[in-house]
Image: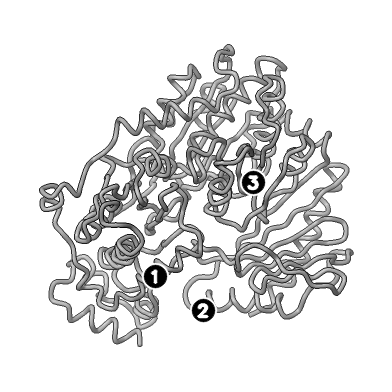
Amino acid sequence: MWRDHYERWLAYPELEPSLRKDMEDKTEHELEEMFHSSLGFGTGGMRGILGAGTNRLNVYTIRKANDGLARYLVKNYRKSELIRGVCIAYDNRKMSKEFAIESAKVLGYYGIKSYLFDDLRPTPELSFAVRHLKAIAGIVITASHNPPNYNGYKIYDDSGCQYTPFYADQIVSMVEEVTDLFSVPVLEESELKLLGLLEYIGKEIDDAYVALVKTVLLHPTLEKKLKVVFTPLHGTSRVLGARLLEECGFTFFPVMSQFNQDSSFSTVKSPNPESPAAFEEAIKVGNIHQADLLIATDPDADRLGIAIKQESGYLLLSGNQTGAILIDYLLKQRRVLQTLPKRGVVFNTIVTSDLGAKIAREFGYDVISTLTGFKFIGEQAKLIEKSDVEFLFGYEESYGYVVKDFVRDKDSLQAMMLAVDAANYYLVTEGKTLVDKLHDIYKEYGYYLEALHSIDLFGIEGAKRINRIVEWFRNHPVRFIAGNKVDIIEDYETGKRLQNRSIKMLTLPRSNVIKTILENGDWFVLRPSGTEPKLKLYVGVTGQTLEEAQERLHSLSKAILAMVEPIA
């Protein structure tokens, strides 16, 4: 089957020359990888390696995706509403700008107007822009923190939230109806402008977005003693991130080597703020200026990583630790400022630490856990927007946070401003760092530690092994592990929650995820990544002391990995 697709591409006379060249000198196995399937949608939209083939991201697969989206919009919106348009943003990756324009060209053919940003912009600003302009949808061309040879395509509904499965599945079915990649109709850019179907946007949206991001500061007039190092990792936060820090009066030092739009990410091993390697250049700048706090955002600026100055060097906080600190700061300071609502909700995911939830519940607020993927938190925000329940905070362990729901996706710039506000407040009023405050939280609530083990499994065989591993755990439920009995098994694919031989049905959407909870409260989750070729293993434990928690985390992680390894 894959060879038929390959032969058709090879025979297409108008094939992009760079893509034709990409098919040259490839082995049989490489060609099969390129053509064995169509690039699909995962938890973060559609991501793939750039290049020729149905299983690669290129001008033809981008057109195909947009054709499906356009026909979905035409079906679900009146003709008079299509002029509300679709907002389109893009990051610094190879082909991002070209794919953004191709998106507008396909939408325009169907009479749908595009609002295209005039330069690269953060993903959260796109989410904001959809609602600000009252558009019917949004598109971001980005592969987030994936390697340089990747790009991607994310789509948003009219609330600025990524399409949830019920709607995404309808769009995907329309995408799959496109059988001839080379015949997707387009209008050229000149035609779009002539017909009023393409409008470039920029400064007005920036100003409106920045004004709202500033409102997350709880102590905007407090003396600014904090010294910050900021790196956008060559990505989209470079302009607005620097602007926010400067206009809010913080002393910051940019990592200038990472402020250029380098699509190869040549100064960093991985443009992912979850990785300590992403902070290597920031640490050098931090040491020069004796900075208190290092901040890194990923290329599309939806994830935030922070590192805190210690006597031994800079300590990178995990996403769970940062989330707990921000929730604790937000709730305690809003209580002092008397701005806490009577009713409010904190949102997290089923793989997020329980620490933030415990803090929120201590304040009397509800906590709602969703599946992994910020679209589910955005969906929940939409459900409460017209109620008397306030959206307090949303986050996931993978360094994604949103403080105020004028953005319906994770927002590193909101999180950055709340983090520097908190760090400055504790420095000025208590002489403490965020690490000091983290230990205060541990002493108050218990020592919650987590680990993420990512098992990289590439290609067709890798995907098959990922499925075999998850299916093995599904068909062989763990009853006893690391010296502890299992209490609960939640299988989100079957929708069943097993406890003491009783079965309850889960209310969340179906997903290929299995969560196992031990009698002592520790837990682990198996989840195939929706954006990368890897199996993710999440582990969470609690201890009365740091040493106890560390030992439990090590023991449970070791036991699970030992079970996974033999499954070929």
x 35%, y 32%: residue: 206
Label 1 vs label 3: CA separation? 31 Å
Q: Given the image, on which type of amino acid does mark 2 rest?
A: Glu
Q: Given the image, on which type of amino acid does mark 3 rest?
A: Phe
Q: Residues within 10 Å of mark 3 (few under 14, many from 20)?
A: many
Q: 274 or 442, which is in the foreground?
A: 442
Quadrant location of the N terminus?
Answer: bottom left
Q: Report x, y in % for residue 190.
A: 11, 50
SS type, badge 3 = strand
Residue under numbered circle 1 = 39
For the question of whether residue 121 can be seen, the reply is yes
Q: 349 or 223, which is in the foreground?
A: 349
Quadrant location of the C terminus?
Answer: bottom right
x 58%, y 11%: residue: 223
- Tell me, yes or no, whether the two marked residues, 2 and 3, touch with CB atoms within 8 Å: no
> Relative to residue 310, is residue 58 drawn left or right?
left
- Select label 2 or label 3 by which is in front: 3
Q: 348 or 314, which is in the foreground?
A: 348
Q: Earlier in the sequence, mark 1 or mark 3?
A: 1
Q: Earlier in the sequence, mark 2 or mark 3?
A: 3
Q: Which mark is residue 461?
A: 2
Label 2 vs label 1: CA separation? 16 Å
Q: Earlier in the sequence, mark 2 or mark 1?
A: 1
Q: Quadrant of residue 239?
A: top left
x 59%, y 13%: residue: 222
Residue under numbered circle 3 = 347
